[in-house]
Every structure is written in structure tokens, then in C-alpha cells.
Image: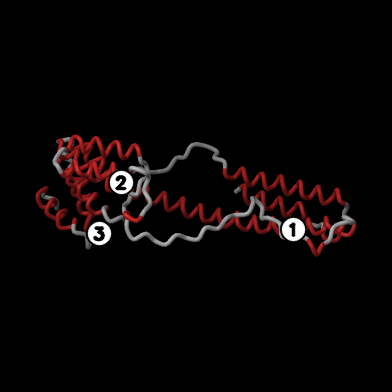
Amino acid sequence: MRVAGAVFAVSLAFAGQAPAQDQQTLADIRQELTVLHVEVQRLKREFSTTGSPSPSVAGGTVLERVDAIEAELQRLTRLTEQLNARIDRVVADGSNRVGDLEFRLCELEADCDIAKLSQGTTLGGDVQVTPAASPQPSQSQTELAVGEQAEFDSASEALAAGDYAKAADLFAQFEASYPGSPLAAEAHLKRGKALDGTGDTREAARAYLASFTGDSTGPLAAEALFQLGAALGRLGQTSQACVTLGEVSVRFPSAAAVADANREMSSLGCS
């Protein structure tokens, strides 16, 4: 990997110089600083992409594709953690080398007091460490944008009143206005129910799928997965419906939706 090559190059830039430190000039030290700066810039280029991403999300069923996406996310998370650890080591080593050069540079300057040298910043600048936030027990305690809760409540009221077309439109507007909202999973789920109420089963299934994939381990995931399986059954995709409904008890054995999924599987004649 180019990161390792860059680190190796930094090491070579300073290799074999210890015996000659007493004979170094101010220009020599400045040259070393320049070399180190160039290598740091090369490391920064590691954060630039080199092509289009090509994740593998192939699969025969909806759940297989979801599993493939989850596996790819886990792989990318592990890779990110490995790169983060490597960059931390590069920053620590580079910062120590810069500090050593500053010390030696001060020795060559007549008016520099070594005792008054302050600790320099780390390569890349000081990083502000933010304390980890305490876990939020529910979505209601998560900060929402202005008007976000009100728009969600309006759409929910339309759904409860049986005005399915209006509810579907309001939830669609909500999803467009607040992408990434903490209420997104519930909004997708309720939009699916509203679309089911209008008879648009295909779009309802897509909404249920969006709810499940958006938060596949959240409190609404079991309900979304059950609704997805039931919608697939109504669309005539019995085999995929049976697989999806069977996953409810596998993934969420203690969820209330398990009983609903089992009843739906019986009505579909799932083996």
C-alpha cells in the first residue's frame, strides 16, 4: 500500500544521519523539514479516491442483498479502523521527528533558549477530542430539526385518520426534507402502511425495505421485515415472501412480529 511506502520513505529520509548531527548546518535541518513536509503531503493524498466504488451486493433475494450490503459495510469499517491506526502511528512518529528537528534547530540559533521550547502541534493540527455522548435511550430524546417532529406528527395523524393518500404524500415530503432523520425508519414504515392503504403494494414493499435496511437492528426492524414479507406475498412473490417472513423469527426471536410472520407463512403455505 502507498501509505506504507510513504512511511518507509520518511524513515529513509532520516536514516544514517545520527553520526553526522554535530556537523549539520541550519540548511541541512531545513532541508529535512522540507522532505518531511513532502512525505506528509503524499500521505494526505491517500485520502483521495482513485476510481468509482464497486461494492458487491449481488444476491438472489432481497435478504441476500441486504446481507451482502451489511458484510460490505463491516469490511469497510474494519479497513477504516486499520487505516486510522496506521495514520495515528505515522502522526506520532512524524510529530516526534519534527520536535527533534526543532530542538536541533534551536541549538544552532544563538538567541534560542532550549528550556523555553514549547511542545509543538501534532502533524495535521491539534485534534479536538470530543467526549463520547451518553447513549440515548429512545428516538424522542434525539435532537430534531425545527419543524421535523411537527411534520412527522401531521403525517402520522393523516394515517391514523385513514387518509392514506395524504399520509403517503406527507411522509414522502418528510423523507425528502429530512434525510438521515432519527425518525426515518418509522417514517418509511408508516409510509408503507399508507401506500398499502391506497392499494399500491409494490411501492409499499419498497418503503418497508427502506425502513428495514435503514435500521436493521432497531426497534422497528422486526415489524418492517414482517410487513415486507407480507407485501411480497401479496405481490405473488411467494418464495421470497416465505424466506423473508422466516427471517423474522431468526433475527428477532422475541419480537411481537414473529407471531404475525408465522400466521402469514401459514396462509401462504410456506414449507
The label on residue 158 is none
Residue 64: in sight, yes or no?
A: no
Can you tell which mark lies on residue 99?
Answer: 1
Q: Kindly report the distance in space between the C-alpha atoms of the residues bearing marks 1 and 2.
A: 52 Å
Q: Residue 105: which quarter of the image?
A: bottom right
* Coordinates of residue 5 in the picture (x, y in percent): 66, 49
Q: Residues within 10 Å of mark 3 (few under 14, many from 20)?
A: some
Which label number is shown at residue 252?
3
Callout 3: SS: loop
Q: Nearer the viewer, residue 152 or 269?
A: 152
Which of 114/211 is in front? 114
Which of labels 2 and 3 is toward the front? 2
Q: Secondary structure at mark 1?
A: helix
Residue at 82 percent of width and 58 percent of height = 104
**Place of residue 31 in the rendered image (x, y in percent of width and height, measured from the top left):** 81, 47
Pointer 2 residue: 149
Give percent across and percent down for residue 130. 52, 58
**In this rendering, position of residue 221 left or right of residue 117:** left
Q: Are marks 1 and 2 in contact (CB under 8 Å)?
A: no
Distance between the Cα atoms at labels 2 and 3?
28 Å
Residue 58, quarter of picture: top left
* Labels 1 and 3: the sequence-earlier one: 1
Q: Amino acid at mark 1?
A: Gly
- 134 to 10, vertically: above or below: below
Mark 1 or mark 2, whichever is nearer to me:
2
Q: Earlier in the sequence, mark 2 or mark 3?
A: 2
Report helix, strand or loop for mark 2: helix
Q: Which residue is most to the bottom?
A: 115
